[in-house]
Amino acid sequence: MSHDLLSATTRYCAVLGQPIRHSASPAMHNPAMAALGLNWRYLAFEVNPRRLPQALEGCRAMRFLGVNLTVPHKLLALPLMDELDETAAQWGAVNTVAFEARDAAGRWRPLREFEGTAPDEIRTRGYNTDADAILRALEEDLAFQAAGSRVLVLGAGGAGRVAALKLASAGASEVFLVNRTTSKSAGVGDEIVRRFPATRAIADYPEGRIDLVVNATSLGLNPGDALPLDINRWSPGMASKAYDMIYRPAQTPFLALAKNAGCQTANGLGMLLYQGAKALEIWSGKAAPVEVMREALRRQVYG
Ligand code: ATR
């Protein structure tokens, strides 16, 4: 599927981040936009966090349809939004922004519905598509069902916190939390107890068999990294499924260990895919061509 030529009617989306050079999002979104028959393009911009307000204002002024935000902008963007979708409010981070304008009846509509002369007043609505993507990746890539499950989450940074909370919100019965900085895993445990009291939160390794272990630390990104878990607290057969949020390299030492122990495993490519698919659905109002996006991502990331 090839794109129409760039013209004065081409419309734009973009990802803003710092660093941005290694983002796979343009490679995933442009073929998807073409497959949907849209003369849209998806760009990537390196934006210093100090300039995020100006960058978003520029996108608004130039009638971009939407933007994705990545490191380090997801928290900074919260107070900059005119409106917060409940997904952004619930998870306290914005990774997708949609631009909206008022129709003749005064209702706010996505900007794609306005062609020709621009409505002057455009507002931003912030969404979070990361949290749902975690669960969708676990469901589709590992056939994992959260309801009633026992899970171990390694890492309590931004990604680990959202994964643990999302699993609790989806009905996990027990969430075990392990992090180098124990005050952070304890904090996530407290948040689970407060927000999802049906789930038990335990800031320690599990006893007995669990359904899933998730690596949400950055350990495994670089050659020679330590394992994200204490090998003395891990036994083969401890977990039936293992997920690593890292997708480059395709198999981290953690995933190799889990695979050797008989776990069903998946890496983080699915999370990247599903957060992007949902963002494209928000901007376009159409079902995302997920398989086109998956293939494009695979080619970009693994060559
Ligand atoms: P992200 O948004 O990707 O979650 P982050 O918030 O910086 O990024 O979180 C990184 C995670 O990797 C944290 O759980 C971090 O542990 P700390 O909370 O103790 O910092 C973990 N991590 C990073 N480097 C680590 C290392 N060398 N050893 C153990 N854990 C590490």
Image: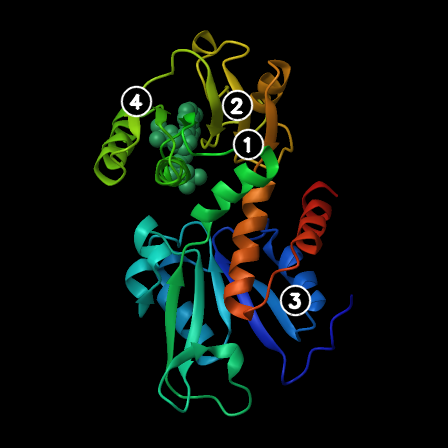
Q: In this picture, is 174 found above or below 41?
A: above
Q: CA distance from mark 1 to mark 2?
A: 7 Å
Residue plotted at (78% across, 65% down): 1
> At which x and y percent is residue 79?
28, 61
Mark 1 or 4, nearer chain start: 4
For the residue pair 103 and 218, the one nearer the viewer reads as 103
Of helix, strand and loop, which one carries label 3? helix
Q: Amino acid at mark 3?
A: Met
Q: Earlier in the sequence, mark 4 or mark 2?
A: 4
User: Badge 3, how many Cα within 10 Å: few under 14, some, many 20+?
Assistant: many
- Are discs 3 and 4 less than 8 Å apart at CB? no
* Label drawn at residue 33: 3
| Neighbour tally class for label 2: few under 14, some 14-19, many 20 plus, Cα within 10 Å | few
Q: Is mark 4 within 8 Å of ligand 1?
A: no
In screen coordinates, is 35 left or right of 145?
right
| Badge 4 vs badge 2, beta-carbon distance below 8 Å | no
What number is the disc on residue 209? none
Q: Amino acid at mark 2?
A: Asp
Label 2 beta carbon within 8 A of ligand 1: yes
Q: Which residue is mark 4?
A: 203
Label 4 neighbourhood size at 10 Å, few (<14), some (14-19), many (20+)?
many
Disc on res. 221: 1
Callout 1: helix, strand or loop? loop
- According to the image, label 2 marks what residue? 225
